[in-house]
């Protein structure tokens, strides 16, 4: 299941297609409703499941509840995380539904096994620390010099924080997606995790203390680019035509955190986005405005991003401890 196999341009030929072709087309359209990252993860999960079924002599499609239950138990025995096991189950369900089969994961035997795995292995995942505004400043101050990598990394980290971007959104930006505005920048997301219909979202990034617009302008001038991917690789002063990957951004961020005296293992590609929410909470920003900026549908999701500072601000002992 390759990504390019999940894209189908609508044509008049589709109307005349055989029923099997229409079923395949419908499956592709359904798959396209999910983010690219989710499709890649599901494809890898499905390959793992079918490989295991091959070793066990079991049928993967349609799979029985017993087969899926044994597979999930196998994953638990390998000490896979609960989130990984849940995603594998979701991938199996997705493929079955796309193929016109009932999902085996809704069967009671599988549901009980999943519940048991969560109860036995479940624990709160270790979240990466928030790169709050003070830490962003600490990291940026340590990125010295005017070489391409330094200019790029300043712009990269600042924009990720200021627009509260997911790392996939950040590296997916083109030059044309970022426009200068008299009060800052307007960042256009053509598609994101919560906008799979492709309607697009616009994010206003204010020109304030961090001078984010100036950092972006400095990068564009240093790189000499006017179109195509906004953030690209560079090696020994030579600019690549290829856009950075999400993994490359995470590694860059960790390296810059380490250079600033921070623990690189404590931070990841999601840390600037989490840091925006945490800083907004620390500054008393309206939760609804923070949710809008982060493109969250539910306020509860935004609240989950705001770290322990909220426990101190709204503490029962505030007036007497």
Image (tube, rainbow, N blue to C red):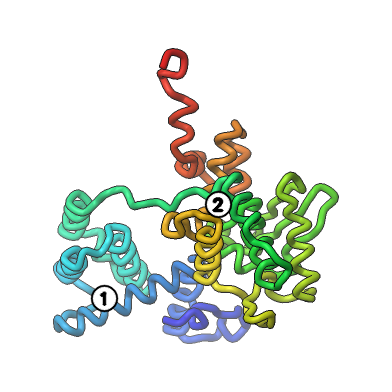
Q: Position of residue 128 (x, y in %)?
A: 43, 53
Q: Is residue 196 or residue 319 the one in the foreground?
A: 319
Give whichever of discs 1 and 2 has the lower sequence position: 1
Q: Is residue 158 or residue 124 the one in the foreground?
A: 158
Q: Position of residue 1 (x, y in %)?
A: 41, 81
Q: Residues within 10 Å of mark 1 (few under 14, many from 20)?
A: many
Name the side, left or right, on which 317 lies relative to 159.
left
Q: Residues within 10 Å of mark 2 (few under 14, many from 20)?
A: many
Q: Is residue 301 or residue 141 the one in the foreground?
A: 141
Q: Position of residue 238 (x, y in %)?
A: 68, 82
Front label number (1 vs 2)? 2
Q: Quadrant of residue 241?
A: bottom right
Name the side, left or right, on which 49 lies relative to 232.
left
What's the residue at 61%, 44% (across, down)? 292
Q: Position of residue 6 (x, y in %)?
A: 49, 78
Q: Secondary structure at mark 2?
A: helix
Q: Is residue 2 or residue 291 the one in the foreground?
A: 291
Looking at the rendering, in which quadrant would you find the C terminus?
top left
Q: Residue furthest top?
A: 320
What's the residue at 69%, 80% (across, down)? 237
Q: Residue furthest right?
A: 182
- Residue 109 in view (yes/no): yes
- Residue 164 in view (yes/no): no
Name the side, left or right, on which 11 lies relative to 297.
right
Assess whether mark 2 and mark 1 are in contact (beta carbons under 8 angstroms). Answer: no
What's the residue at 50%, 60% (across, down)? 258
Q: Which residue is mark 1?
A: 49
Name the side, left or right, on which 92 lies relative to 234.
left
Q: Which numbered dot is residue 273?
A: 2
Q: Which numbered dot is residue 202?
A: none
Distance (Cα) linking label 1 and label 2:
33 Å
């Amino acid at each position: 299941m390759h990504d390019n196999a999940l894209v189908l341009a609508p044509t008049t030929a589709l109307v005349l297609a055989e029923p099997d072709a229409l079923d395949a087309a419908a499956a592709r359209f359904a798959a396209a409703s999910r983010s690219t990252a989710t499709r890649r993860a599901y494809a890898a999960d499905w390959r793992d499941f079918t490989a295991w079924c091959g070793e066990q002599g079991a049928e993967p499609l349609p799979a029985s509840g017993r087969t899926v239950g044994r597979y999930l138990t196998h994953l638990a025995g390998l000490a896979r995380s609960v989130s990984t096991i849940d995603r594998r189950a979701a991938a199996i369900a997705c493929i079955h539904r796309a193929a016109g089969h009932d999902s085996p994961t809704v069967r009671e035997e599988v549901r009980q096994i999943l519940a048991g795995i969560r109860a036995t292995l479940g624990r709160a995942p270790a979240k990466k620390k928030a790169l709050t505004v003070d830490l962003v400043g600490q990291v940026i101050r340590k990125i010295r010099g005017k070489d391409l990598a330094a200019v790029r990394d300043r712009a990269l980290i600042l924009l990720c924080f200021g627009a509260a971007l997911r790392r996939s959104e950040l590296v997916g930006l083109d030059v044309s997606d970022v426009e200068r505005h008299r009060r800052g920048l307007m960042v256009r997301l053509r598609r994101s995790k919560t906008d799979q219909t492709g309607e697009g979202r616009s994010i206003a990034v204010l020109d304030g203390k961090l001078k984010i617009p100036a950092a972006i302008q400095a990068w564009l001038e240093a790189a000499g680019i006017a179109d195509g991917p906004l953030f690209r690789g560079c090696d020994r002063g030579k600019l690549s035509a290829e856009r950075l990957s999400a993994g490359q951004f995470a590694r860059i961020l960790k390296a810059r955190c380490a250079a600033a005296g921070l623990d690189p293992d404590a931070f990841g590609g999601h840390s600037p986005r989490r840091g925006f929410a945490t800083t907004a909470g620390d500054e008393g920003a309206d939760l609804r405005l923070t949710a809008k900026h982060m493109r969250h549908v539910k306020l509860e999701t935004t609240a989950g991003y705001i770290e322990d500072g909220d426990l101190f601000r709204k503490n029962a002992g505030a007036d007497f401890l």
